Amino acid sequence: MKRILLGNEAIAWGLINSSVDVVSGYPGTPSSEILSTYQFIQRQFNIEAFAEWSTNEKVGFEVAYAAAVANKRSCATMKQVGLNVASDALMSAAYIGNKGGFVLVVTDDPGFYSSQTEQDSRMVAKQARIPVFDPANPKEAYHFTRHAVELSEKFETPVMLRSLLRVCHSRQIVEIEEPDFKPREGKFVKDVSRWAALPRKTRLIQAYQQMERIQELTQYNWEKLIKPKTLGLKPGKLLILTAGTSHNFVLETMESLELAFDVLKLDMPYPLPIKEIRSLFDGYEMVLVVEETTPLIEEQILTSKVKGKLSGDMHLVDEMTNDKLLKAFQKIGVYQGENIYPNLPYQGEIPDRVPKLCAGCPHRDVYFALKKVFKRRAVYPSDIGCYTLGINQGVIDTVLCMGGSIGMAIGFSVAKIKKPIVATIGDSTFLHAGIPPLITAIYTKQKFVLVILDNSTTAMTGRQPTAEQSPQIDIKKIVEGLGLQVLEYVYENQMEKTVDFFKAVQKHSEESELPTVALVREFCVLDKPMMLEKPLPGQFATVDQDLCNSCKRCMVEFNCPPFYWNDNKKIEIDPNFCVGCGACMNIVCPTDAFIGDDR
Amino acid sequence: MSKIKYQIVATGFGGQGTVFLVKLLSICALHNGVECLGTENHGMSQRGGTVVTDIKIGDFYTPVISLAQANLMIGLHPEEALRVVQYLSPSGAIVVNAGKDFPKLNHPTYRLDAFHLAEKGVFNIQALNIFMLGFAISHVSDFPFSVREIEGAIYEINPKIAPMNLEVFHLGLSQSP
């Protein structure tokens, strides 16, 4: 059947049609739709399988990997920075291997669209010595997923599918088979020397086996994937080696510039048959390598003929575009024509549009109140999630990584910075990586305030459920289990109550020698079931133009999307975007200019 | 029809429904037997930040629209429209939700103050994307899909709310710049 599929949906279909019945991971843009689509297909076709989010990527990896050790076909899915969290398990699993097919899907984000780093997960595959597929579009994502499962089973090794943002979030018409779901039986065959290989003797054996395996995979890559494509090559001026989405940019730019060079796409950029590939260079004047994000292929096959990132002819940072390729063609002297991709932006001024917390989001009130109570002087480490947008309200000083807010709060406390420390973290991030640093903070007796913003969902990545959906799991009990008193506040749109709560938190912290944990029970305005159960109060706001004195405090400290400056240099509320939360009508304006809008 | 090559950049800010336009037009492509590539922003950009989506209909390789290549830009907000004009080909058309102060640019421009119309109660602002698509189709002569094809896709994407969406689509069709 032909379907329009998002790359991530194509990957999910690839898993279903490989009879993968264990899928586990942690949400993160641009990977999140893989597992949720799998769940959707699962429900649609009444497929019995395990497809669940884990508390973090390492757990997600371990769950899926162990299922594959137990003969199941499985998949772990995560974004590139999530792979950092899971890499401890990966590096070891790469020696041990698996029984059922195990595919590790990792999505990269060149151009930093929604990530802290631009890292190339293929480099991690190389470090782990596992093969990696690099699909160019949703069609390939579907087929390579299936191929990865087969290959993993054949060679008993984890196989990575590295997908890029422009695959994950691109749509294409893909031909897929009807599901014919035949999952493997779960069985664990004891083999201590393999599954519990210890240093040094048994691990050494596995290391030699791993080298043999990678040799065989290199041969496989040459014979099955590369060699058939080399038959049409006709040596001339330039050979272009491509991988992943870069292949599309190369073909499109060449077509537009009316250039014709040999192009060889490497579907599996590691492990590469280096000698065989280099032998293809004979007869060509130059070889250009085009890949994202780091020069993985280029470093492997480098000779004096090779041009690319290492030679300074291709860009090193930011995502691929046709105009960057055109410049590379000019640099290496194969294109002298005009620049058909001129960059002629609008010359007038366009105000920046920064992402903001949604209208009605309780996070906004929490940050407003924090600033009111702890002032500018406090240092505010924060974390990864929607609430990072509190940066617009001037209440975030550092953002590092998942769970980093608490580790950094400890470091600042240890450094005796002589300022109050107020860390903010969401519920999903706290469960993901916030508990170990909190334990460290307690037994090393660090003093800071930790605000847990609990909306019971992974909001930023599309509202995936968190562990809190289980009645047994409650952040309050977790923190109390560590011996701390939890100051709890159920969010209300009355700002004075929110401010009073944080005054109590401040007092508690001043009198304590340990971390003070404030737990704010919130909701997510994007979560439809949650909002149906308890809708916003419908208190729409407008601005009394006589009372507004243009002090801009509401813009700086509250920063609600419907606020804008009108032609009289006064604040106005766009009625199209006010959601009626009523929060701004209390304390936010020093002159009480926000008033009810009777409509 | 098979020879068609048409590139549309649709832009707005998070929550305005630009991604919906990609879905809708790709359904039209599927039914027409034409290849189609689209790409969109998720995550951070959906929190009211700029959202740019590219739709390429016909035989293309990458879903990303390059500088100076788009045949049409649909801007759901004036500032967002101005932010992406460099992606329009010299003859590329602009369909934009903007007031009279939208600057004069060297492109065929079809301007409609949809925010004003929504305030007057002409249509529900939630359906701005479909309203502007209707407006685009009635004025852009080389648009690759017909009114009927779009209607079919609107129905397919969500039959439940299709009557409401179709009404807004037709309201958009009947607007003059």
Image (cartoon, rainbow, N blue to C red):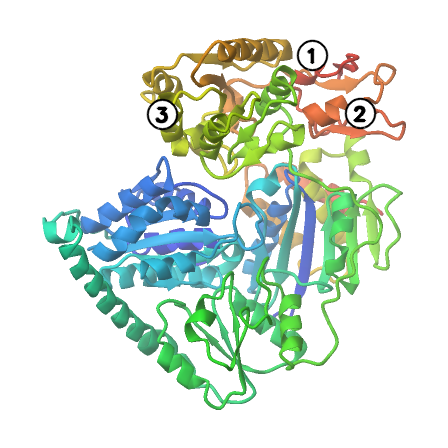
Q: Label 3 sits on what residue type?
A: Ile
Question: Where is A2 relative to B124, above or below?
Answer: below
Q: Residue at x 35, y 68 (%)?
A: A271
Q: Is residue A449 left or right of residue A348?
A: left
Q: Earlier in the sequence, mark 1 or mark 3?
A: 3
Label 2 Cα crowd, 10 Å radius (few <14 / some 14-19 / many 20+): many
Q: Amino acid at mark 1?
A: Asn
**Residue matched to label 3:** A439
| Nearest-to-viewer mark from 3 and 2 | 3
Mark 2 chain: A
- How dense is the environment of label 3, judged by Cα within 10 Å: few (below 14), some, or many (20 and up)? some
Closer to the camera in the image, A132 or A274? A274
| Element on which disc 1 rests | loop
Task: Tell me the tag on residue A572.
Answer: 2
Q: Chain of mark 3?
A: A
Percent of width and height locating residue B92: 77, 61
Q: Nearer the viewer, mark 1 or mark 3?
A: 3
Left or right: A391, with A99 as reference point: right
Q: Amino acid at mark 2?
A: Glu
Mark whose residue sits in front, 2 or 1: 1
- Do circles 2 and 1 both sit on a common chain? yes
| Residue for badge 1 | A586
Q: Is residue A95 left or right of residue A306?
A: left
